[in-house]
Amino acid sequence: MNAAAPTTPRVLLRTLREVLAAQMGAQARLDRVSQLVAQSMVAEVCSIYVLRTDNLLELSATIGLNANAVHNTVLAVGEGLVGTVARNASPLNLVDAPSHPSFAYRPETGEDPFKSFLGVPILRGGRPRGVIVVQNQTMRQYGEEDMEALETVAMVLAEMLAATEFMEMRAAHGGGQRPDLPASFSGDILAPGAALGVAVLHEPRVRVSKLIAENIDKEIARLDEAVDTMREAIDAIIRVEDPSLAGAPLDVLETYRMFAHDKGWLRRLREAVESGLTAEAAVERVQNETRAKMLRQRDRYLRERYSDLDDLANRLLRHLTGAASATSKLPNNMVLIARHMGPADLLDYDRSRIVALVLETGTASSHVAIVARALDIPTVAGIDDIEDQVEPGDVIIVDAEQGEVHIRPQADITRAFSAKMELSSERRARFAAARNLPPETADGTRISLMMNAGLLFDLPHLEETAADGIGLFRTELQFMVAQQFPRLGAQATLYKQVLDTAAPRTVTFRTLDLGGDKILPYGQVADEENPAMGWRALRIALDRPALLRYQIRAMLLAAAGTDLRIMFPMVAEVEEFRQARDLVDRQIEWHLRHGHEMPRSLSVGCMLEVPSLAWQLDALMPLVDFLSVGTNDLVQFLFAADRMNPRVADRYDFLSPAVLSFLSQIAEKANIHGVPLTVCGEAAGRPLEALAMIGVGVRTLSMPAASIAPVKLMVRGLHLGELEPFVGQLLEGGEHSVRPALQDYAEKSGILL
Ligand code: PEP
Ligand code: MG
């Protein structure tokens, strides 16, 4: 196979361009590429492995190995040298491959005589799509030039493999779907509901269609020009305080500027063009390498730096391709698709246009899920590669009752879905009928069902659901949707509107709970290893009391003549509560000094979401007017399982003896001290969880608006006299979960769940 003279990457690319342009089938194209590469690199073997939809690497073309092995030899990611290249998303250059510990011998391939090995991942969006390998019998040391040539070919292959004909090949053995055909996926439900709409990518891909340069000098000039324009744009943002960009903190922009002038990055871009790529393909290739590094990187700081570089590459691509910005021309019924999203990102969109949300990663207690529930946006998460599966404009059904997402649905699916929508409207009718029924158990105990809220558009739900009040008003949401810190007046106006709309029902305002995954677009982001356990909520408030003072002042002003309830988040010890309460007292003095009208009543409460506080309850109870358990945080700290990490967030069941015993003890203490107790975490809105909470003595629950009716219907079927002893005996056991037992109990007792 080793033909005449080795060709340079440029010549190789030129020949590849001909292959891309020629009319031929997918297999013929792959065969031709491996042949060209083998020739130009003077390799005895060139093989292309394609990652199938079932995540196995299939030998799909080869020059030099046994032709019979093609479409028969299959490796798992991580298996053998090829699998290692794919897993690490980085090349492997070996003089003596068989002596490498990962070498996996496959007799059917006939690769025994080959010693040297150069494998390069075929990456798209930083993720492996396949591997291309060259091998030689001699112990050859492949040079930089070889590596570069193969990486460039890999990039062309990545584009080829994204084409429809190749997707068919990928799916043929892997059992997947062609990209233009319907496809269905299962995921986790983050916010219930169902909708049909049109796909919009949160971070739209910039499509690079022209890969191979016709004139390298021209491409270098285009690259230089785009880099200059991009630098000027960044400088301009820093120089002029453009109000529309007020969100970007200066240090982030400075980091951008630093990278935009980074010599190493610019050199790599230039080198990629010099190897024969167009300017945009060069940016994409370097971006792919950065993404691969980003995915491998464990250090948060470095990962973020890589992600800055990634963002910069996107900007550069937009300059080069003239692609539209992310927010232009959004449809009215959009299903938003994102790999990952923070709550502020979601709030940036016009709510009235979003009908559903699909995320690659996200957990039910993450704040983006909380915001999605508050906005009543059906949300499904945990679908791998969703951004790659969907084309903007595709029709999508999001069934967040079943946790299913149907892309490009066929008529029968759409029909079945419409029937289901009708069913769920039946369910809605049942819930609507429950509106006027009291949340009273069958044996006559009134349970108080409150609603969680945080923005003005939550308020109409109070009337719709007939909730008893707002048990948790997340004040930070106003800060997260604003372009800049809401001033005293703006805060007071919102609080007053909330109080006026809710009256005569009560509202419990929680003071700012920023930090963790709740980040302000305009604030400084503290770089913390572990933000959920970091500088957040009351910790920030006590260290920087001006913010809390302002907020309390705004609440006092808003609540003139009416009832005001304030509670503090993330209290870890009694002393913190004492300091916060002191601050309230000082604001009351200020308020009186300035002759303002006082609230009719003031209650100051404490959230219990840090377990340490549970061991200080006797000291705490006399100081508080009420206690509210935030189970979202509490449970993540009790189990040491990050609520944001999908791998562990659901590892432990809320309905476990540990959590229920904990709640039972809190309820008992609250009862002894005569302190009103509420549970306001998301679990309070799930009927079975709510049943268990009532079973251990909780009588007030605060939940997303959509949960009020289902929880109410559940409550009305309860017999406390039976439920309490039943739940009590479950606390003694050592099971992972008491869910099955509770489900069984509910079913036998005819309780609606
Ligand atoms: C909680 O932690 O349960 C809670 C209600 O607060 P948040 O979810 O806003 O952190
Ligand atoms: Mg919390």
Image (cartoon, helix red, strand yellow):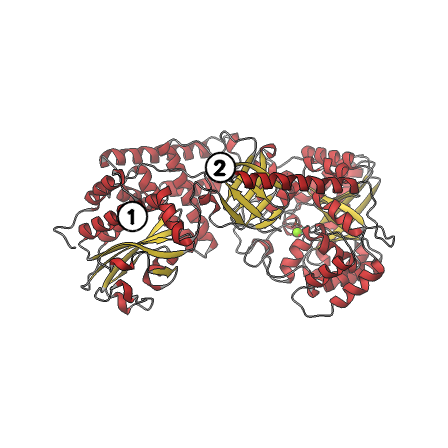
Q: Is mark 2 within 8 Å of ligand 1?
A: no
* In this rendering, position of residue 130 left or right of residue 185: left
Q: Is residue 264 above or below residue 692?
A: above
Q: Quadrant of the N terminus?
A: bottom left
Q: Nearer the viewer, residue 247 or 327?
A: 327
Q: Nearer the viewer, residue 682 or 578?
A: 682
Q: Is residue 107 above or below residue 353?
A: below
Task: Give the image quarter of residue 413.
Answer: top right
Q: Residue at x 43, y 40 (%)?
A: 180
- Secondary structure of the residue carrying tag 1 is helix
Instruction: Give, as a three-letter code, the residue at label 1.
Output: Gln
Neighbour tally class for label 2: few under 14, some 14-19, many 20 plus, Cα within 10 Å: some
Q: Position of residue 157 (x, y in %)?
A: 31, 46
Q: Position of residue 665 (x, y in %)?
A: 77, 63
Q: Position of residue 698 (x, y in %)?
A: 78, 56
Q: Do callouts 2 and 1 mark residues in contact (Cβ within 8 Å)?
A: no
Q: Nearer the viewer, residue 27 or 734?
A: 27
Q: Nearer the viewer, residue 691 or 573?
A: 691
Can residue 574 be seen from the camera position used here?
Answer: yes
* In this rendering, position of residue 317 left or right of residue 382: left
Task: Give the image quarter of residue 332.
Answer: top right
Q: Is residue 374 above or below residue 627?
A: above
Marks 2 and 1, the one that precedes in the sequence: 1
Instruction: Give, as a three-letter code, the residue at label 2.
Output: Asp
Q: Is mark 1 within 8 Å of ligand 1?
A: no
The numbered disc on residue 478 is none
Q: Which residue is mark 2?
A: 394
* In this rendering, position of residue 351 left or right of residue 612: left
Q: Position of residue 470 (x, y in %)?
A: 75, 43
The numbered disc on residue 27 is 1
Q: Nearer the viewer, mark 2 or mark 1?
A: 1
Question: Mark 2 to mark 1: distance in Å?
Answer: 28 Å
